[in-house]
Image (spheres, rainbow, N blue to C red):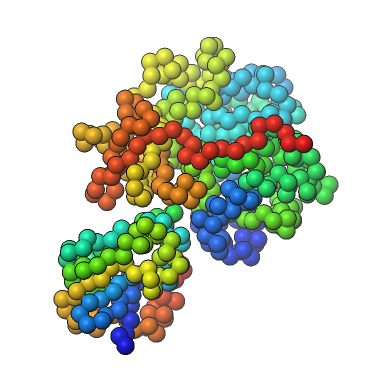
């Protein structure tokens, strides 16, 4: 079973072979409120670790989505673009954002495990 | 600076409100269910809004007061009946808008509801213009709540008998457990509803009773999506000192009788703009896709020329899509004109459209 890791920008990442599935955490959706718009990176494009790779908007404001690792976008989740409320409903599973063929496996080591992330999320929430 | 709290602060906390600072007040932006649910609940049932941060200005005087106020507001105040309300503006000499407001004729005077961020400045301006001839009270001892949505009339009438017989844009004094409350049939959501001016000490009690009857507290977040769907302006965004009522497409609110005389502050500019037209005007804008164009988004025409700017934009939960309004060069203001909105460096197609985005359901006559 592959371990899920977490970034300080509140993304989760699940690695299977050399393909990583990335989304935003439940904690992130709770901070954002109702998500009403999602924009994803283009399939085939390359994204760099900590670079922007999409946007989510709530009724209140727009927020960038960052990628916690570098790689080529091999798939995107059109379902959340068509119905962004799915992101609030199931953020850490069916409402994933994009899949990357990752370049450098060692980038995973810089990320947090679940316990560390939960602690981080608790400390940083207002 | 000390952040002020309204008399409903504790009740907001009990309902898990998220607070923001707004115009110097700690105000609830949303409660636990979130903006979209709160918005829909208001449209389908009944929502309560704490708008106690807004100014309640009472001015008392005789016929001279009416004459003096007509020099300030573009309204036919001498023919405004007792307990009837009008939407209007406080303008400068160039017809720039200091504030938009609701003015109601009450016994021996007027009640003016002012925006929270403007009320102190409005008070100063009006005091100077009226040369301190009249008793003016910006009443901090009264709270203001709005109850909006199709079930509101029944809910409020169960507690304060008789309110359901009020007509739209009219009001009266009622009593809530022997306390005098002034209630108008009005609001800012595009729904039937009421605004209730009540002494601070009793607003908590009344609000809890309204909640017990099935209404729910709604935050400023949903108030914003509701008013935008209804095509209503938000001061400081859609209206400010650089815009006139004619540019804001609000000429319906200016009395024709008063325009013919032209003796109010800003009337020269208003008359000129009504005769010659304006170069920019407020319009509704509907993006074609799901992209949300927020305040300050630039608007371009088909030839990529910058022709305007969004002043309010969000996702409209009842429209189930993005909605916006903004100011655009007059020649592009016709309905169905195609424009482009620059969001995050990309241009997205949109169309000029009529307002409101969501059909109003005000009650015109009283329901028996």
Q: Is residue B300 above or below residue B333?
A: below
Viewer-closest of B344 and A102: A102
Q: Is residue B105 above or below residue A52?
A: above
Q: Quadrant of the C terminus of chain B?
A: top right
Residue A32 percent coordinates (x, y): 43, 62
Image check: B346 left or right of B76?
left
Viewer-closest of A35 and B272: A35
Image check: A100 left or right of A64?
left
Viewer-closest of B25 and B152: B152
Residue B216 percent coordinates (x, y): 64, 56
Q: Is residue A69 above or below residue B237?
A: below
**Residue B322 visible, this angle:** yes
Residue under the point 28% across and 45% down: B348
Image check: B23 left or right of B63?
left
Residue B56 percent coordinates (x, y): 64, 40
Residue under the point 56% across and 43% down: B189
The residue sitting at the bottom extreme is: A1
Residue under the point 29% across and 48% down: B343
The residue sitting at the right extreme is: B178
Residue B209 percent coordinates (x, y): 74, 56
Q: Is residue B331 above or below residue A119?
A: above
Q: How many marks?
A: 0
**Residue B24 visible, this angle:** no
Residue under the point 64% across and 65% down: B14
């Amino acid at each position: 079973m592959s371990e899920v890791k977490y970034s300080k920008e509140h993304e989760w990442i699940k690695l299977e072979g050399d393909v990583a599935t990335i989304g935003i955490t439940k904690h992130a959706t709770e901070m954002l409120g109702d998500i009403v718009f999602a924009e994803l990176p283009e399939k085939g494009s390359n994204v760099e670790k900590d670079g922007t790779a999409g946007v989510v908007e709530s009724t209140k404001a727009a927020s960038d989505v960052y990628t916690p690792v570098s790689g080529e976008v091999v798939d995107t989740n059109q379902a959340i673009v068509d119905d962004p409320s799915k992101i609030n409903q199931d953020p850490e599973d069916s409402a994933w954002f994009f899949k990357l063929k990752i370049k450098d496996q060692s980038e995973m080591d810089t990320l947090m495990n679940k316990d560390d992330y939960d602690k981080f999320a608790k400390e940083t929430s207002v | 600076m000390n952040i002020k709290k309204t008399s409903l602060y504790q009740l907001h906390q009990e309902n898990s409100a998220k607070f923001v600072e707004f115009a110097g007040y700690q105000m609830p932006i949303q409660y636990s269910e979130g903006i979209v649910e709160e918005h829909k609940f208001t449209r389908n049932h009944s929502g309560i809004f704490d708008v106690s941060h807004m100014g309640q200005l009472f001015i008392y005087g005789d016929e001279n007061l009416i004459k003096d106020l007509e020099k300030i507001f573009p309204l036919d105040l001498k023919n405004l009946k007792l307990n009837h309300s009008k939407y209007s503006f406080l303008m400068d000499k160039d017809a720039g808008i200091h504030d938009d407001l609701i003015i109601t004729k009450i016994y021996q005077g007027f009640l003016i509801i002012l925006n929270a961020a403007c009320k102190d400045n409005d008070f100063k301006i009006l005091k100077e213009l009226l040369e301190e001839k009249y008793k003016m009270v910006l009443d901090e001892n009264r709270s203001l709540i709005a109850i909006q949505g199709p079930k509101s009339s029944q809910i409020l009438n169960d507690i304060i008998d008789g309110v359901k017989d009020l007509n739209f844009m009219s009001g009266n004094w009622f009593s809530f457990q022997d306390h005098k409350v002034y209630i108008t049939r009005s609001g800012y959501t595009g729904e039937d509803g009421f605004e209730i001016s009540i002494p601070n000490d009793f607003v908590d009690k009344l609000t809890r009773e309204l909640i017990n009857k099935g209404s729910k507290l709604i935050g400023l977040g949903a108030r914003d999506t509701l008013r935008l769907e209804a095509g209503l302006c938000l001061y400081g965004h859609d209206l400010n000192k650089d815009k006139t009522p004619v540019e804001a497409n609000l000429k319906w609110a200016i009395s024709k009788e008063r325009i013919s005389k032209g003796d109010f502050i800003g009337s020269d500019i208003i008359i000129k703009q009504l005769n010659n037209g304006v170069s920019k005007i407020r319009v509704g804008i509907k993006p074609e896709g799901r992209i949300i164009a927020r305040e300050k988004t630039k608007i371009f025409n088909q030839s990529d020329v910058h022709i305007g700017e969004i002043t309010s934009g969000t996702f409209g939960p009842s429209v189930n899509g993005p909605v916006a309004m903004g100011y655009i060069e007059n020649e592009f203001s016709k309905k169905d004109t195609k424009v482009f909105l620059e969001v995050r460096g990309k241009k997205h197609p949109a169309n000029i459209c009529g307002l409101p985005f969501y059909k109003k359901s005000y009650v015109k006559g009283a329901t028996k």
